[in-house]
Image (cartoon, rainbow, N blue to C red):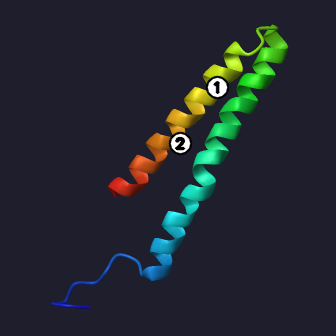
Amino acid sequence: MRNGKRKKGGVYAQVARYSSIIFLLPSCLLVGYLIGYFLDRRLDSDPWISVAGLLLGGVAGLVRVVRMFSR
């Protein structure tokens, strides 16, 4: 605590924020792929919707990471 200013969160809060990225990106990719996979099975449009779901999951994960670090 210098000059009356407090840090936002301690070391443990920063470790938790950075370690959540390890789970955030793969989980977004997995969820996007699984949604696309089940839609592919339902609509019989093999691999196109799963590829689109994978890409959308990746974009969603990156947007989430950027928002997390912009705070």
Which quadrant of the structure image shows residue 23?
bottom right
Q: Secondary structure at mark 1?
A: helix
Measuring from the top left, give residue 36's x and y in whole percent: 71, 23
Q: Position of residue 28 (x, y in %)?
A: 62, 41
Is 65 displayed left or right of 50 in the figure?
Answer: left
| Location of the N terminus (image quadrant) | bottom left
Report the label total: 2
Amino acid type indicated by mark 2: Gly
Name the quarter where the C terminus is drawn: bottom left
**Coordinates of residue 66 in the picture (x, y in percent):** 40, 48
* Amino acid type at mark 1: Gly
Name the residue carrying label 1.
53
Is 71 on the left-hand or right-hand side of 43? left
Q: Who's the residue at 66% across and 46% down the image? A: 27
Name the residue located 75 percent from the left edge and 31 percent from the top edge. Answer: 34
- Between 1 and 52, which is closer to the camera in this rendering? 52
Q: Which residue is mark 2?
A: 61
Q: Where on the picture, by quarter, is residue 49?
A: top right
Residue plotted at (42% across, 81% down): 10
Above or below 42: residue 12 = below
Local packing at callout 1 (Cα closer than 10 Å; few below 14, some 14-19, many 20+) is many
